[in-house]
Image: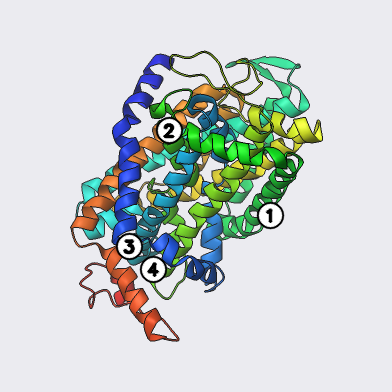
Amino acid sequence: MREAIDFVGSVIWEPVLIYLCLGTGLLFSIVTRFVQVRMFKEMFRLLFSGGESKRGISSFQALAVSLSGRVGTGNIAGVAAAIGIGGPGAVFWMWVVAFLGASTAYVESTLAQIYKEVDEGQLRGGPAYYFEKAMGQKWYAWLFAISTIFAVGLLLPTVQSNAIGNATELAFGGSQVINTIVGDVSIAKLTTAVVIVLVLGFIIFGGIKRIAHFTQVVVPFMALGYVAMALIIIAVHITDLPGILALILTDAWTPMAGIGAAIGWGVKRGVYSNEAGQGSGPHAAAAAEVQHPAQQGLVQAFSVYIDTLFVCSATAFMILITNQYYVTGVETAVSGGVLGTDVQANSPAFTQYALSSVVGGFGEVFVAIALFFFSFTTLLAYYYIAETNVAYIRRTFRFPGELTLIKIMLLGAVFYGTIRTANLAWTLGDIGVGIMAWLNIIGILILFFMGAPAIRALRDYEAQRKAGVSKYTFDPEKLGIRNADFWKK
């Protein structure tokens, strides 16, 4: 079974997908005239514009919900894996995929806003909605919806909860074990699994409002606290910083594990972390109350910067500047860093050892706490994404208790992931991300060549902005955009 799972993961993440992610980001960067640079100031202004309503959430809440999905295990354990397998140069490719991916995030989130709808008094939208309405291919929309429910309901949660369990075990000890039906499990992991399931269950049964209110407080707090700790570590080793930057840049082209590994793992973990192109961010983007679809697209583009350029970079610098890592190449011996191969690269251990080398035992505890909040909020985002796709399917076919079933399924995956090994959890997660990325990227490329509604929306927004309007409006029919029924009303 393990060999079969590894094989499926390797097929999904063939180099074609890696270059498809980069190529799509480059294409959208060019056609939007690098909107991620030109409108950076406008992105920041829009963060705090708009307000919450009975049917939707504010731009900032939507950003917090989507960031809760972006900022997670990928920012800590994912970065460690990218360095451990792809070398320090993988960090450079994470930056590249973030920069280019910001334009992809703009496109997919703007599409979600254009084609959103009101479902039982609540704003809903996402790839399934815009594939049906803009592409006119309901079968493709259903394929994405079902694949996404499977990915975020079963596969991806195992990665987040597994990282929490591993970090807790390393911080508080895992010597005491008990025998279960899935093998020997440490009491620390088992206790952690029970706590996560109970707290997560309480919040997800409260709906998007409870999720939004929780994440808008926790996400900014945890991200700022984590970056602040990274700055302390960097300050202690400030004289080494120029050398680390040089290492990242030079290793990106001639890395220890080969340029293919650096690009592959940098892009893979970059997409896993910032989710640009994966199709997860548009679900939260569609729930925002805004005057113009392009506004939330710009806000979501900014979230990619927060995730990768700030949080992922913080992890990378902590690991590299303290030398707490190793690199295993395809045909090379272990090299780089001071850690031995007994430490799992797919776990948060690199980051915990990096902090511990400066602040002692508190470092392991801090990473465990940070991972709890990072991963926990990501699990909330996963549930909301699953719920949205269930709501899409329910428009055509419904059966009693479908949302309850999804909640139980996700909670079961969380419990299982917490007590299992890291490598298996990450492989399952990569499969989930890969399936969503393939379907979403191909879909938004088709929509671009069918009329590019997101690009039309950007031009319309820029024209109104240049005209100095006090209140933005969006008329889809005037722009030649069909089936955007929400905005026509």
Q: For marks 1 and 2, give the CA distance.
A: 36 Å
Q: Earlier in the sequence, mark 2 or mark 3?
A: 3
Q: Earlier in the sequence, mark 4 or mark 3?
A: 3
Amino acid type, residue under disc 4 in the picture: Ala
Disc 4: which residue: 294
Disc 2: which residue: 253
Disc 1: which residue: 221
Q: For marks 4 and 2, give the CA distance.
A: 36 Å
Q: Residue at x 54, y 30 (%)?
A: 83
Disc 3: which residue: 32
**Residue 164 in the image, given as x and y percentages of width and height:** 64, 34
Amino acid type, residue under disc 2 in the picture: Trp
**Residue 473 in the image, given as x and y percentages of width and height:** 36, 80
In this rendering, position of residue 41 left or right of residue 294: right
**Residue 467 in the image, given as x and y percentages of width and height:** 37, 85
Specify few, some or many for label 2: CA neighbours under 10 Å numbering under 14, 14-19, or 20 or more.
some
Quarter holding residue 469: bottom left
Q: Which one is nearer the viewer's eye here, 265 or 144?
A: 265
1 or 2: mark nearer the eye:
2
4 or 2: mark nearer the eye:
2
CB-based contact (under 8 Å), mark 4 and mark 3: no
**Residue 71 in the image, given as x and y percentages of width and height:** 56, 46
Specify few, some or many for label 4: CA neighbours under 10 Å numbering under 14, 14-19, or 20 or more.
many
CB-based contact (under 8 Å), mark 2 and mark 3: no
SS class, disc 3 = loop
In this rendering, position of residue 346 left or right of residue 38: right
SS class, disc 4 = helix
Q: For marks 3 and 1, give the CA distance.
A: 32 Å
Specify few, some or many for label 1: CA neighbours under 10 Å numbering under 14, 14-19, or 20 or more.
few
SS class, disc 1 = helix
